[in-house]
Image (cartoon, helix red, strand yellow):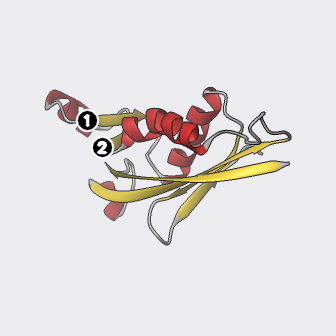
Amino acid sequence: MFKIVREIRFCYGHRLMDYQGKCAHPHGHNGRVEIELTADSLDKQGMIIDFDDMDKYIRAWIIDPMDHKMVLRKDDPLADSFQKMNEPCYLMEGNPTAENLAREIFLAIQKNNMPVTRVTFWETDKSSAVYQPG
């Protein structure tokens, strides 16, 4: 079995709804994502996927939609305000926690037919969440 891991970094803002603590208020992070792809065999160039191609796809599915945007739960009252001001938002079903962001990124990559097996989302240098199907 072959594995490759690619790290992607982006900046985003968020807040958590129904949360008692400082993360209930809008704030920002420098996020880091580790994306693991796994395959039993390699293509004719000897790769799972070219890292340059992976970067291009990941940028389109993750970075461009989330980078320098407020990531909010769809029912967050701030979402309407931001949209009325033409401020960029990325809306999610659930709270934009590290766990949910890891899953969101995993599913976006999987939906685009890449052999993703694990996504680790680092919200800070000391805190990360991993999503991999059981």
* Displayed quadrant of residue 45: top right
Residue carrying label 2 = 70
* Residue drawn at x 35%, y 59% as measured from the top left: 29
- Local SS, label 1: loop
Marks 2 and 1 close (CB-CB < 8 Å): yes
Circle number at residue 88? 1
* Residue drawn at x 35%, y 63% as measured from the top left: 21
Residue 73 in view (yes/no): no
Label 1 Cα crowd, 10 Å radius (few <14 / some 14-19 / many 20+): some
The type of residue carrying mark 2 is Met
The alpha-carbon separation of the residues under discs 2 and 1 comes to 7 Å
Label 2 Cα crowd, 10 Å radius (few <14 / some 14-19 / many 20+): many
Expressed as whole percent of the image width and height from the top left, the position of residue 49 reads 67, 39
Expressed as whole percent of the image width and height from the top left, the position of residue 20 reads 37, 60
* Residue drawn at x 51%, y 38% as measured from the top left: 58
* Residue drawn at x 38%, y 51% as measured from the top left: 16
Expressed as whole percent of the image width and height from the top left, the position of residue 111 reads 62, 27
Q: Earlier in the sequence, mark 2 or mark 1?
A: 2
Expressed as whole percent of the image width and height from the top left, the position of residue 118 reads 68, 49
In the drawing, does residue 88 fall left or right of residue 61? Answer: left
